Amino acid sequence: MKIAFAKLEQPTSGAIVAGVLEDRNLTPTAAELDRQTGGAVTRALAGSRFKGKPEDLLALVAPAGLELSRIVLVGLGKPDALDALALQATGGRIVAHLNSVGETTAAVAIDDIPGAKLPPSELAAHLAFGARLRSYRFDKYRTGEKPEDKPSLTTLTVMLDDAAGASRAYDPLEKVGDAVIWTRDLVSEPANVLYPETLAKEARKLAEVGVDVEVLGEEQMRKLGMNALLAVGQGSARESQLVVMRWMGAADESQAPIAFVGKGVTFDTGGISIKPAGGMEDMKWDMAGSAAVIGAMRALAGRKAKVNAVGVVGLVENMPSGTAQRPGDIVTSMSGQTIEVINTDAEGRLVLADALWYCRDRFKPQFMIDLATLTGAIMIALGKEHAGLFSNNDELADRLLAAGKEVGEPLWRLPLGEAYDKLIKSDVADMKNVGGRHGGSITAAQFLQRFVKDTPWAHLDIAGMAWSDKDSPTTPKGATAFGVRLLDRLIANHYEEK
């Protein structure tokens, strides 16, 4: 779908979308359409349940005399609630509706609304951003779809007086959108197509936007002592990989970078501690944390963020075979700490243990944030409404919570503490990789904390947020790319040179 910005004027074909505020207060464009149609707009509103709330939408077939296919009225709510997230959701709802009725071209009028939190140019940019995010569809493997089952909308024009200003405001959002869509594609790919080597190959494409990409194979990791990571992949015919990405956007290249670390289990059978068959196909997206890191690096580079950033992702496939690690095995991590493997399905933390230590030891970052679809327990605790946040640094945690609210990727902070740490004490090694039935997400975070030392660190358990079972205004059912917008907003708010 093509998105364009143009001066505010009535289109001569397709659909026109106009806003209506709460209590059916017409915006200037809606009022003009009402005049042109002899009061058809107000009559339609009076005969409907449309109140102008954000979820409201009402479509009218354009009356004779108008060179349009239909008029679509969209609820905007109260003027003082018109912020970035509200307009993104509006853009998503508009696209979903237009596709459902078969429109191919449409124009959305953005009026100057007193009391709105943002100027029209930014309102327009965020509406377009939401439309772009909702237009996503992973359909590369659908070979026999009927035309009527495919999205119809090809062009969406956002109209306002300051079209040039809207285009400028949209440019960095478009770069983030590119990263989100790419990330969704990566997470959506099946495991026979996307495995450690091919995901590393995808990450190499970041060189096109100026990111330095380095890929370590198993021999290199073995020399570094990454036995925890390598143990996870030893049952697979696929070779494990470690991808290191560097974006040096700060004026001072010697400035300590910020760092993102991602779990990339491209398929997780559970290994010898094998998962139940039902739903195992979902485990293709157990690499969503690594995809979010790769996507965040693309977002920063795409919009030329003035920051030094490092991304490290450990890529493995967890398979049962004659060479797979066994429950009871003891592995020595890169840090020198030993781990008793109680459950081979608690594998993500083994991957992150070596990736975090490597990142901390090599790059000495200002802080590290890891993202991982780490535990089913986080969904028991938080459902699919929040990702879990654990941190050893209150400032970093607070900034992440705020950034999550801004972009609609909410986090909820959970505790860490000595009592939880004792639950992963092993009788035969420095630690074991699971604690017990209770507090499973917390003991997983406690495990990771042992590999960051005094570096400020946050762990995001995104198991409940990486994949959506239903449509939302800006995210169709499927891969969400949760974390890309969150990390980008965190950097833009606090760590980027102004």
Image (spheres, helix red, strand yellow):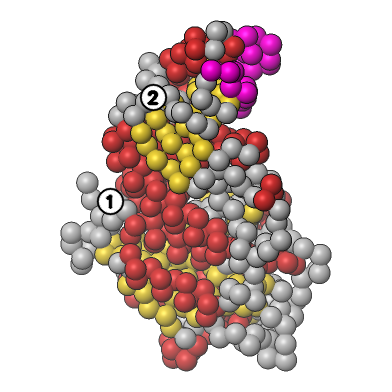
User: Callout 1: helix, strand or loop?
Assistant: loop
Q: Amino acid at mark 2?
A: Glu
Q: Give residue 279's position: percent from left, percent from top.
A: 77, 63
Q: Earlier in the sequence, mark 2 or mark 1?
A: 2
Graded by Cα atoms within 10 Å as few (under 14), some (14 to 19) or many (20 or more), the crowding at tag 1 reads some
Q: Give residue 298's position: percent from left, percent from top.
A: 39, 61
CA gap between label 2 and label 1 equals 38 Å
Q: Give residue 36's position: percent from left, percent from top.
A: 49, 12
Whether residue 107 is visible to the viewer of this picture, yes or no, is yes
Going 37% across and 37% down the picture, which residue do you hit?
5
Q: Amino acid at mark 1?
A: Glu
Residue 237 falls inside the magenta stretch: no
Magenta stretch in the rendered image? 42-65
Q: Quadrant of residue 441?
A: bottom right
Graded by Cα atoms within 10 Å as few (under 14), some (14 to 19) or many (20 or more), the crowding at tag 2 reads few
Q: Is residue 250 left or right of residue 441?
A: left
User: Callout 2: helix, strand or loop?
Assistant: loop
Residue 127 marker:
none
Whether residue 72 is visible to the viewer of this picture, yes or no, is no
Going 30% across and 29% down the picture, which residue do you hit?
162
Q: Give residue 72's position: percent from left, percent from top.
A: 57, 25
Tell me if residue 356 comes above or below residue 405 in the rendering: below
Identify residue for label 1. 496
Going 34% across and 47% down the picture, which residue do you hit?
172
Q: Foreground: 442 or 492?
A: 492
Tell me if residue 327 comes above or below residue 376 in the rendering: below
Q: Nearer the viewer, mark 2 or mark 1?
A: 2
Identify residue for label 2. 9
> As drawn, which residue projects farthest toward the front?
65
